[in-house]
Image: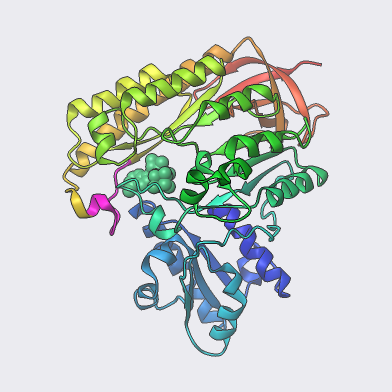
């Protein structure tokens, strides 16, 4: 999400005559687009800020700006804590950056952390920073109303709002014309996407006759897939509470919608899920996965898991492990619980699992996932996979890498193929992270 937002920032500024560089030595201004989701993310930002001391020394006019969620969370306090910082802007304030920069140039530190109920940056065509020219993100909504008790996002990114569907379709069509072959529709909770021409208050759209004129995520997905059969569509993140079978049927209908769903579970125990305010039980999550397997056989499924949430018992932790086994996730992002100030969990529960217990549980989760990923990849050996080539393999410039529909990385010999090509690859070997194969011509 931040990566995608940085493209919006670059676009706002290039419109005003600034130019963009990825070489810090060329830069007069540096922006850090920051994450606040775990304490570690913020510590990394604070360390990174120290690197800019020398730039300030060499050039007293050098401007350091902090953008994104950490900026939103700490507001002007960040200016007191990090003397190096000149400018602080939250995720809804990027249109204001030219004014904020001017104010810094006039000798003042500047802050805008105003959140918005409407801002979706719908009209802004993001600069495709560090692009491979093949895959791109399109932000379809902003904010989150879910209020999971551990999560700082609703506070840093504000209320949920959906972007005008025509602007999403236009951006996708333009990307295809520019040679891109895969887009990922992005939102904190894409299943909650709901747009109506007259209001962006979701409660109103749902309760009135307005519902008929509204565009749901399933509808948006259907329309996006219709742009061109050679444009692959992915999306992230799905939410077990809001995902409907309708979305699964749209996925089944279109070959170019990738058969891959990222469905964060967080915990395998219903009592912990309740304290996390996730809005579903273990059984309901199991039911969701069963629907996916039924409607989309062979669909890749990945998840997010948090170890050591407040008062999590050993038995509850083992329920997470057993759910992982049952679901046979292909991939997982796994984290230790990190208390975030201001969240419901920080207010209502004690962060009472010792760090070494959190770490040990996390390690058990990681070890199990390694086995599950390897098991899943082994099932793909001996089969052909349609791969969209993204670039040269990191390990050898004689090989290319790309992804199959299930989002698995596939490496194979380069021959005459190039990024953007669709190649049928016969998989002969694998690790827990990669499929290895040869092209079928
Ligand atoms: N501590 C640890 N992990 C967290 N996540 C969100 N908030 C926290 C937190 N306070 C994880 C969740 C979420 C992913 C993006 O980050 O697993 O799905
Ligand atoms: Fe955070 Fe929950 Fe929203 Fe995801 S759905 S961003 S975990 S509040």
Residue 173 percent across, percent down from the top left: 77, 44
Nearer to the camera, 228 or 284? 284
User: Is residue 347 inside the magenta stretch?
Assistant: no
Residue at 37% of width from left, 68% of height from top?
A: 74
Residue located 78% across and 31% down the image: 421
Residue 32 lies, with reference to residue 246, above or below; the image says below
Q: Which residues are magenta?
A: 336-346
The colour scheme used here is rainbow
Is the residue 311 above or below the residue 29 in the image?
Answer: above
Extreme top residue here? 382
Q: Residue furthest front?
A: 209
Dividing the picture into quarters, in which one does residue 340 lie?
Answer: bottom left
| Left-right relation of 329 to 125 | left
Can residue 393 be seen in the rendering of this structure? no
Q: Is residue 339 visible?
A: yes
Residue under the image location 65 percent in, 64 percent down: 10
Q: Position of residue 275 (x, y in %)?
A: 24, 40
**Magenta stretch, main secondary structure class:** loop
Q: Residue at x 29, y 41 (%)?
A: 276
Q: Which quarter of the figure has residue 362? A: top left
Q: How many marks?
A: 0
């Amino acid at each position: 999400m931040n990566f995608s937002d940085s493209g919006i920032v670059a676009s706002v500024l290039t419109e005003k005559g600034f130019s963009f560089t990825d070489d810090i030595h060329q830069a007069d201004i540096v922006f850090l687009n920051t994450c606040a989701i775990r304490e570690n993310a913020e510590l990394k930002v604070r360390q990174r800020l120290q690197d800019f001391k020398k730039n300030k020394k060499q050039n007293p006019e050098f401007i350091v700006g902090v953008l994104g969620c950490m900026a939103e969370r700490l507001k002007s306090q960040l200016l007191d804590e990090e003397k190096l910082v000149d400018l602080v802007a939250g995720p809804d304030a990027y249109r204001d950056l030219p004014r904020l920069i001017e104010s810094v140039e006039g000798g003042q530190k500047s802050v805008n952390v105003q959140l918005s109920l409407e801002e979706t940056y719908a009209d802004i065509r993001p600069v495709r920073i560090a692009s491979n020219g093949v895959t791109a993100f399109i932000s379809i909504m902003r904010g989150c109303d879910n209020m999971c008790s551990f999560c700082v996002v609703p506070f840093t990114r504000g209320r949920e709002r959906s972007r005008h569907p025509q602007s999403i379709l236009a951006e996708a069509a333009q990307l295809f014309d520019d040679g891109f072959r895969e887009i990922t529709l992005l939102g904190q909770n894409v299943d909650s996407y709901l747009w109506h021409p007259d209001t962006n208050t979701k409660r109103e759209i749902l309760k009135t006759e307005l519902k008929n004129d509204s565009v749901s995520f399933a509808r948006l997905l259907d329309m996006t897939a219709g742009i061109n059969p050679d444009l692959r569509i992915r999306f992230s993140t799905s939410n077990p509470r809001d995902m409907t079978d309708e979305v699964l049927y749209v996925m089944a209908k279109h070959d170019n919608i990738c058969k891959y769903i990222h469905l964060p579970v967080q915990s395998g125990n219903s009592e912990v899920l309740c304290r996390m305010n996730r809005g579903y039980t273990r059984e309901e999550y199991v039911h969701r996965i069963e629907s996916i397997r039924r409607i989309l056989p062979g669909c890749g499924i990945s998840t997010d898991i948090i170890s050591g949430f407040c008062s999590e018992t050993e038995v509850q932790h083992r329920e997470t492990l057993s759910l992982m086994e049952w679901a046979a996730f292909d991939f997982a992002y796994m984290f230790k619980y990190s208390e975030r100030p201001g969240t419901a969990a920080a207010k209502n529960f004690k962060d009472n699992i010792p760090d070494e217990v959190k770490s040990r549980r996390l390690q058990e989760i990681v070890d199990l996932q390694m086995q599950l990923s390897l098991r899943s990849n082994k099932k793909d050996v001996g089969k052909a996979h349609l791969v969209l080539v993204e670039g040269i393999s990191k390990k050898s410039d004689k090989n290319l890498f790309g992804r199959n529909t299930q989002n698995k990385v596939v490496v194979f010999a380069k021959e005459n193929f190039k990024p953007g090509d669709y190649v049928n690859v016969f998989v002969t070997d694998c690790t827990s992270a990669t499929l290895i194969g040869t092209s079928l011509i």
